[in-house]
Image: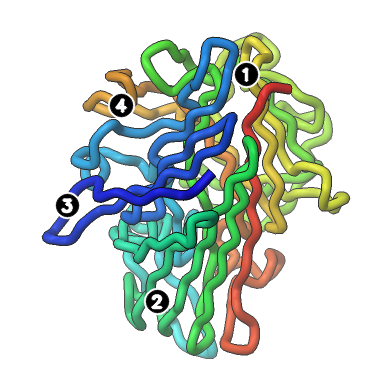
Amino acid sequence: MPVTLRRFAEYRGAPVMEAELRSDVAAIRVLSWGCVIRDWRAEAPEGPRPVTLGFEDFAPYPTHSPAFGALCGRVANRIANARFALDGREIAVTPNTPPHHLHGGLDGFGRRDWTMETDGTALRLTRVSPHGEEGYPGEVALDVVMRLEGGRLRVDMSARPDRPTPINLAQHSYWNLGGAGAAGGDVLDHRLRLAASHCTPTRPDLIPTGEIASVEGDPLDFRAARPLRDADGAPLPLDLNFALDARDPAEPAAEVLSPSGDLRLRLWTDQPGVQVYNAPRLAIPVPGLEGRRYGAYAGLCLEAQNFPDAVNQSGFPDPIFTPDRPYSQRLEIEIARP
């Protein structure tokens, strides 16, 4: 079905556009502000079910959204002490979670205006990140293309810098397959499976130690599907990067099953890691979709990415991209009945 565009709101004197991608089993609404996936309705036994946290109107996004549905960058996740070395120089970026840098800074890619257009079958979002934005060196031309086929969304991302600079993009939706609207509960009894036998442990401030550790025999082992609880049934708080195993590209990196088993999410990525975050401290003071108040464990993020703080960790995958080595990422997310 065709992709449609409409004017959704106005912010700082500029229009905020919304696109709708629709199939016979899904409807996805995307904002030009932050590439935000504002709403995803998946066909469930009772009819269309909202499966990602969001707001009915635009007004709460700039002040109350913890990156709901946003495309985070220039560097998603954390940079220790908001500093890194590049070509013999120390680069300082915005310490928006002092003393560290998170998700590209105060106004990272997930809080910027993008140009939105469609050829009727795919949605394209573009912008140019200027040299010095949030402290990062170099200009970066960004291109994101979204296509919906059935219940599967494919997102192709590219970033072309004019000089060496770190790039790490991450799509930051908070999933709730039981329902992100008024009828939904928390995600603790969602069953998660990851193709990951290792993770990157962190210090208490969530900066990686540099170790890549096995999850064998650990509560963090999700190689077999299980709820987001510990062995005693208590909530298991998660905000951790998992190092994905080598696998057949046709095999998903992550799978999530709703508590009732009536919807399944599958995620495919070409990135080396996925950050699993189940929002243990979430407390949004304004209503979300269908008037719901989002609290602790209301959503589950699966952020396909390079490893956090890779700019400062020599043992992590190289996050520096150049004119001769541009950035690309392919992400596919399918939400459908099993």
User: How crowded is the residue under tag 4: few (<14 C-alpha within 10 Å), some, or many (20+)?
Assistant: many
What amino acid is labelled 4 in the image? Gly
Residue under the point 76% across and 42% down: 252
User: How crowded is the residue under tag 3: few (<14 C-alpha within 10 Å), some, or many (20+)?
Assistant: few
Q: Which residue is mark 2?
A: 136
Name the front one of labels 3 and 1: 3
Measured Cα–Cα span from mark 3 to mark 1: 36 Å
Mark 4 in CB contact with mark 3 (< 8 angstroms): no
Q: Earlier in the sequence, mark 4 or mark 2?
A: 2
Disc 3, SS: strand
Q: Earlier in the sequence, mark 2 or mark 3?
A: 3
| Depicted 159 relative to depicted 305: above or below | below
Residue 239 found in image quarter: top right
Q: Which residue is mark 3?
A: 10
Q: Position of residue 145 (x, y in %)?
A: 53, 61
Measured Cα–Cα span from mark 2 to mark 1: 40 Å
**Frontmost residue, 33 versus 140:** 33
Residue farthest to the right, as pictured = 248
Q: Position of residue 221 (x, y in %)?
A: 76, 31
Q: Earlier in the sequence, mark 4 or mark 1?
A: 1
Residue under the point 29% across and 53% down: 17
**Frontmost residue, 10 versus 208:** 10
What amino acid is labelled 3 in the image? Glu
Left or right relative to 239: residue 61? left
Residue under the point 45% across and 54% down: 71
Q: Which mark is residue 258?
A: 1
Q: Quadrant of the N terminus?
A: top right
Q: Which residue is mark 4?
A: 288
